Image (spheres, rainbow, N blue to C red):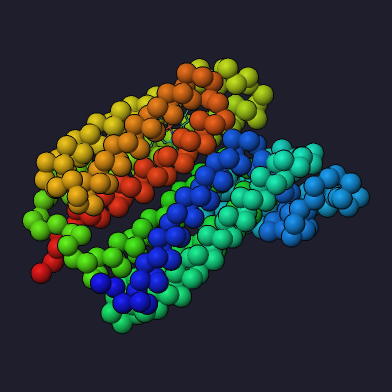
Amino acid sequence: MYPAAEKRFINTNRITIIVLFLVIAAGGIVRSTGSGMGCPDWPKCFNQYIPPTDVSQLPLGYEEQYVEGRAQKNERFARIVDAFGYKEKADQIRNDESILKHEEFNVAKTWTEYINRLTGAVAGFCLLFAAFFAFTYVKSKPAIFVWSVVNVFVVVLQAWLGSIVVSTNLMPWIITVHMLLALVIVCISIYTFYLATTFRNRTILINQRSAILKGLAILSLIVMLIQVVYGTAVREAIDHLNDAGVLRVNWIDSLGSDYLLHRILAYTSLGLSIILFVLVNNKFSSLTLQSRYAWMLLILVGIQMLSGIVLARFNVPAFAQTIHLVFASLLFGTQYYLMLLMTKLKR
Ligand code: HEM
């Protein structure tokens, strides 16, 4: 059905989406194992392309060397933040002494962070190839080409932000922006995939307009986005508690109103997903993409709720932190795709 050049784009785009979720999973593992500072510099790790396996391989006085580099980078970043009008945040970057704290070498953490960076680099190349192959649509469907190129720029921005995450010693609000930007990249990739597949195969789309279904799909996507933002606020609060030396067993009880809202929104999301699932399955046959993705949505939201309950009941175990982050991203991507699939076929 698709010409060879288009098939090449669609396959590359599909692989890119899978790799992007792997990058998010790698980022989640880095976070839950506390490996974010495993490489004190960026993009190389201890100034090497393949990082050391033993402390004896590190140059003498390496601690000061990287701290100095980070301080300069942070000053440059603070000026940018200032220029955007966030004076308070800029001052925080300038004055927080913990930012320049040196972390002891730990081979497991170094390699965990290094593998995370390698996965990120693979994703970058995938996006570059996708943009290259998208050239085939430049006349027939320019939006695919434009968005594929935009995504390459966004991923470069994301890589730079990753370097700021390191140089500011994992400042919580920067991790949040980094995570939200990852979702933007995923959504652009899903969008180009949707445009490319529906360009030739119109049967994917629906025949009759259904304002209720489309409206509900948009509403649950918005609620999910707010829910993700509250989730990151809860994660920021947990990071601050950890930095302040609060014991893990006391984390959940020390969380404030953001956590309460996060739970209320979780049940709202669950409710909306169930309604969407029932309506989609009433309207579409089980063989359609719409029905398959509605099933997927229901399963993912179930796993997400369970992992949240495990976080709450068992003192925020590290494995559940990674699962919760990865499934939140999968859930968001699925919901976004399902919303796109509610588009009516134009004759
Ligand atoms: C639709 C359901 C849910 C979604 C989409 C969701 C999403 C998220 C997201 C995106 C984060 C931030 C992860 C990170 O940045 O590392 C988060 C954190 C968190 N969520 Fe949820 N969540 C949901 C349900 C729940 C429920 C039901 C609970 C508890 C009863 C819960 C408890 C937590 C906790 C404790 C954190 C902080 C975890 C950490 O520090 O890594 N979540 N959530």
In percent of the image, x 59 and y 35: which residue is there?
32
Ligand 1 sits in quadrant: top left
State the image coordinates of residue 131 (x, y, percent, origin top left): 44, 72
State the image coordinates of residue 31 (x, y, percent, origin top left): 59, 39
Regarding residue 28, the answer to whether it shows in the image is yes
When the figure is inspected, residue 155 is found, relative to residue 116, above or below; the finding is below
Please state which of residues 298 and 225 is positioned toward the viewer in this rendering.
298
When the figure is inspected, residue 341 is found, relative to residue 9, above or below; the finding is above
Q: How many marks do you count on the picture?
A: 0
In percent of the image, x 17 and y 37: which residue is there?
278
When the figure is inspected, residue 311 is found, relative to residue 186, above or below; the finding is above
Please state which of residues 3 and 26 is positioned toward the viewer in this rendering.
3
Please state which of residues 134 and 6 is positioned toward the viewer in this rendering.
6
In percent of the image, x 10 and y 69: which residue is there?
347
In percent of the image, x 42 and y 35: which residue is there?
230
Direction from residue 85 to residue 60 in the image, left or right: right
State the image coordinates of residue 222 (x, y, percent, origin top left): 30, 44
State the image coordinates of residue 141 (x, y, percent, origin top left): 29, 75
Regarding residue 149, the answer to whether it shows in the image is no
